[in-house]
Image (cartoon, rainbow, N blue to C red):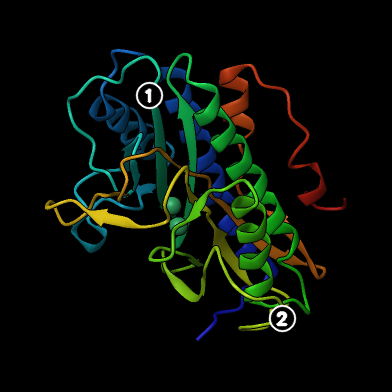
Amino acid sequence: MIKIKSREEIELMRESALIVSKTLGEVAKAIKPGVSTLELDKIAETFIRDHGAEPGFLGLYDFPNTLCMSPNEQIVHGIPNKDPLREGDIISVDCGALKNGFYGDHAYTFAVGEIDPETEKLLKVTKESLYMGIRQFRVGNRVGDVGHAIQQYTESHGYGVVRELVGHGIGREMHEDPEMPNYGRRGKGKKFVEGMVVAIEPMINLGTHRIKQFPDGWTIKTADMKPSAHFEHDVAIVDGKPELLSTFKYVYQALGIVSDEEDEFRAGS
Ligand code: MG
Ligand code: MG
């Protein structure tokens, strides 16, 4: 069942999303060759708790950490460890927080130092596909419209769209209805209505869409061991249109990036 949010609930969700956004900014500041994903995990946990929230993933389905840290060929759900990141790696950082009874959940894939142009393009196209999906999240459209937009764009670059993992509604539960696949057919699936809040999160592989699961029961990697990218935003439908609750602003501040990509999804735009 899809749980529609009131304006007041959406404002609370914006607070939760903002904590995750700022946490990703803190992580962004610390990402460099030599740092371990476990060190980054501690930075995130401390930041979230210092801001009156709880880590959203820690203990959820028994996940052991605050961040999902998925380097290179890992797609999602990687467990932080003591291995140092190396120059040329990419690292997908997925973060959740719980505040006032509502979850925030979003993700960004970072380059560690200089990365090869092929992987850099994968990151760029995956993030662009996220916004193409978000653009379709409006009253009158359907779940398939979002997935179709993401799939068409990323497959046009020869990339693989992960099928087994999908975006989702979000609210008092981390994962609510509806499921939001990153593939689909136009005009198919559940219809969007005012007050829906979802996490849209393309997981896009440089090569095959096929996946493998690690024996740890969590980590998902690409079947061909080529890199995978993951970007995620929390989005509400307000006045019929998509409005971002999360922001990459703090990541961009940390990385010195100037971007207007979120402007069209702000209130009043
Ligand atoms: Mg996530
Ligand atoms: Mg999610």
Seen in the picture, residue 113 relative to 5 is either above or below; the reply is above
Q: Amino acid at mark 2?
A: Gly
Asked if the residues shown at circle 1 and circle 2 are in contact, with their CB atoms under 8 angstroms apart, the answer is no
Please state if 9 lies on the left or on the right of 220 as rendered. Answer: right
Residue reaching furthest to the left? 215
In terms of depth relative to the viewer, which is nearer, 19 or 213?
A: 213
Q: Position of residue 222 (x, y in %)?
A: 33, 48
Q: Position of residue 237 (x, y in %)?
A: 72, 67
Q: Position of residue 98 (x, y in %)?
A: 41, 54
Query: Can the viewer see residue 159 in this picture?
Result: yes
Look at 59% across and 54% down and name the residue there: 155
The local secondary structure at tag 2 comes to loop
The local secondary structure at tag 1 comes to loop
Residue reaching furthest to the bottom? 1
Q: What is the distance, in whole Å, between disc 1 and disc 2 at their CAs?
A: 38 Å
Instruction: Determine which of the numbered discs, if any, sits on residue 187 in the image.
Output: 2
Q: Amino acid at mark 1?
A: Asp
Residue pointed to by mark 1: 89
Q: Which quarter of the figure has residue 91?
A: top left
Seen in the picture, residue 141 relative to 244 is either above or below; the reply is below
Q: Residues within 10 Å of mark 1 (few under 14, many from 20)?
A: many
Look at 38% across and 24% down and name the residue there: 89
Number of numbered labels in the structure image: 2
Query: Can the viewer see residue 100 in this picture?
Result: no
In terms of depth relative to the viewer, which is nearer, 2 or 258?
A: 258
Please state if 231 lies on the left or on the right of 71 as rendered. Answer: right
Q: Position of residue 78 (x, y in %)?
A: 27, 44
